[in-house]
């Protein structure tokens, strides 16, 4: 008798512990047509802190020979606000292509290494109902529709719009470029460059009229005269006259068309100017006038003839 009482108490305690954890499997409908899909919701509810380990049942591609698993959401943990229990939920999408009544098998959980199973479910799969007045016919062959411009434009409207936009942009750019070229003012015809001798003589004449040395700027006057001579020689004989010293320039001109008298005349003018520029020599009025006369004569005497083909 005592052992019987202990067994009853043990059973009641086990029942109380089991009440803390509930497993279940529910179909959102128990009747579908062949090929339709149904949601199978697996869930386990338990008091917070009462469960340390949960092992879910293994689910493959099929539940049995008649029921296929289409998708599996995986396990999601939620809080049941109404009961205050923690809850884990997993939803399977299943289907069947065989008509009849098919059992959804129970699912076995291991909760703290203790097995718990859901109740089995029954799913009815019905065939498609046919109108008794209609005759069953064979499947028709594939029929190719004729080409339709309207349908093609509708299917490719995005690319058609992009193409038209690109053409419009190209046309606009072409129009504005053509209009700009048409309205562009013709460039004025530049006058031909004056001959070298004419330019140098004109510059010497202008310098003389400025009366530079008469105003006391002897160094500036001598420098400008010799710079014009050096520029003339550099362009006329293609030697670096502007960057050379007097000594270097005279060495370069030894193989030039200048004769001995012309080279001597040029050297005298350059060395006299060097004395004024670097030795601070003060030239007389006659020497300043002679500098201009000598530079003008040198340019005229060495001017290229019309038959040489030089500038």
Image: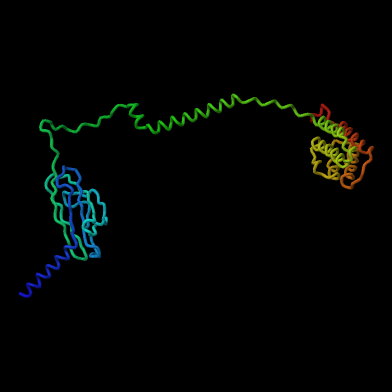
- The residue that appears at 92% across and 36% down in the rendered structure is 289
Q: Position of residue 267 (x, y in %)?
A: 89, 41
Residue located farthest toward the left when viewing the structure as drawn: 1
- The residue that appears at 16% across and 50% down in the rendered structure is 65
Q: Nearer the viewer, residue 7 or 58?
A: 7
Task: Say if 2 sits above or below 106 in the image.
Answer: below
Tell me the quadrant of the picture where the N terminus can be found: bottom left
Count how many numbered circles sit on residues in the image: 0
Q: Quadrant of residue 176?
A: top right
Q: Is residue 135 visible?
A: yes
Q: Nearer the viewer, residue 252 or 295?
A: 295
- The residue that appears at 13% across and 35% down in the rendered structure is 130
Q: Position of residue 68 (x, y in %)?
A: 20, 49
Q: Quadrant of residue 158?
A: top left
For residue 287, side relative to residue 42 (left or right): right
Q: Is residue 56 visible?
A: no
Residue located farthest toward the bottom when viewing the structure as drawn: 2
Tell me the quadrant of the picture where the C terminus can be found: top right
For residue 89, side relative to residue 164 (left or right): left
Q: Position of residue 28 (x, y in %)?
A: 18, 48
For residue 56, side relative to residue 171 (left or right): left
Q: Nearer the viewer, residue 84 or 106?
A: 84
Q: Position of residue 29 (x, y in %)?
A: 16, 47
Q: Quadrant of residue 144?
A: top left
Q: How is the image coloured?
A: rainbow
């Amino acid at each position: 008798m005592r052992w019987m009482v202990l067994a009853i108490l043990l059973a009641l305690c086990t029942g109380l512990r089991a009440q803390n954890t509930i497993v279940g499997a529910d179909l959102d409908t128990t009747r579908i047509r062949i090929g339709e899909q149904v949601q199978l919701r697996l869930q386990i509810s338990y008091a917070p802190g009462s469960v340390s380990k949960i092992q879910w049942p293994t689910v493959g591609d099929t539940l049995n020979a008649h029921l296929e698993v289409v998708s599996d959401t995986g396990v999601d943990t939620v809080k049941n606000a109404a009961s205050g229990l923690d809850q884990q939920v997993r939803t399977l999408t299943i289907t069947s292509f065989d008509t009849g009544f098919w059992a959804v098998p129970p699912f076995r959980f291991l909760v703290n290494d203790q097995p718990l199973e859901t109740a089995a479910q029954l799913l009815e799969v019905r065939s498609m109902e046919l109108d008794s007045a209609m005759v069953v016919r064979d499947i028709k062959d594939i029929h190719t529709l004729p080409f339709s411009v309207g349908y093609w434009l509708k299917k490719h409207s995005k690319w058609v719009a992009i193409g038209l936009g690109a053409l419009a942009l190209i046309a606009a750019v072409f129009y504005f470029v053509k209009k700009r070229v048409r309205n562009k003012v013709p460039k004025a015809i530049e006058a031909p460059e004056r001959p070298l001798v004419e330019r140098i003589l004109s510059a010497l004449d202008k310098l003389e009229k400025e009366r530079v040395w008469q105003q006391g700027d002897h160094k500036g006057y001598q420098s400008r005269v010799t710079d014009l001579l050096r520029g003339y020689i550099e362009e006329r004989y293609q030697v670096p006259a502007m960057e050379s010293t007097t000594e270097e320039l005279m060495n370069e001109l030894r193989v030039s068309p200048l004769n001995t008298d012309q080279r001597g005349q040029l050297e005298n003018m350059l060395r006299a100017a060097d004395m004024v520029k670097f030795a601070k020599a003060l030239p007389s009025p006659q020497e300043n006038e002679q500098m201009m006369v000598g530079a003008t004569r040198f340019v005229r005497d060495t001017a290229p003839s019309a038959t040489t083909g030089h500038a």
